[in-house]
Amino acid sequence: MSSTRKQIQKDYIERARAYHQKKQALRKLKLKAALRNPDEFYLKRIKTKKFGVFYKLKRRANKYLKDDLKYILLKKKIKEIDADIEASKSRVKELWKLLENHLQKESATVENPNQFVDDGVLTENQVMGGS
């Protein structure tokens, strides 16, 4: 019996301390509210709406207006398209270089069919079926 009584007393003491601490905190807050200057301006007054006694934060509408949002999305799309165009330009340049190299090789072999091309460099003249 004595151990349960001690446990109950311990629990009671803890709850009493917590109760008194909360009461003191409320007293301090009430005092602070009473001493507050009513002419002061708080930004929360703009961001909140009064519902009876309580204040609640106003729901924020979209950060950007619809037109602004469309403009931002359009700007983003334009940047993506510009990046695609630049990538395509570099790819086209590479293809042109390959085509020019291929045409040079072809023209070298058409002019003189006895010439051999190795990696785009003429090596030596050989006569086919020669001695």
Image (spheres, rainbow, N blue to C red):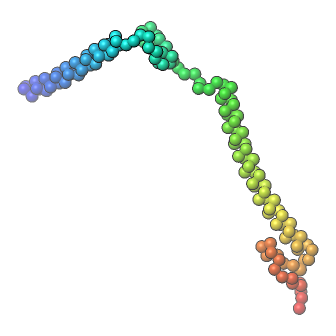
Name the spot of residue 100 as percent of width and height, x first. Answer: 83, 64
Seen at 46% across and 15% down, the residue is 41
For residue 4, which quarter of the picture? top left
Q: Residue at x 70, y 41 (%)?
A: 79
Closest to the observer, 109 or 124: 124
| Above/below status of 33 relative to 10 | above
Q: Position of residue 107 (x, y in %)?
A: 89, 70
x then y, percent, for residue 111:
92, 74
Residue 125: image x %, image y %? 86, 82
Q: Is residue 86 visible?
A: yes
Residue 129, compared with residue 47, is above or below; it is below
Q: Is residue 71 left or right of residue 9?
A: right
Is residue 48 at all visible to an observer of this figure? no
> Would you say 60 lies left or right of 99 here?
left
User: Residue at 57% across / 22% down in the picture?
Assistant: 61
On the rendered image, what quadrant is the C terminus found in? bottom right
Q: Is 114 located above or below residue 64 in the figure?
A: below
Is 120 situated above or below 27?
Answer: below
Q: Nearer the viewer, residue 42 or 86?
A: 42
For image coordinates 77% across by 73% down, the residue present is: 119
Q: Quadrant of the N terminus?
A: top left
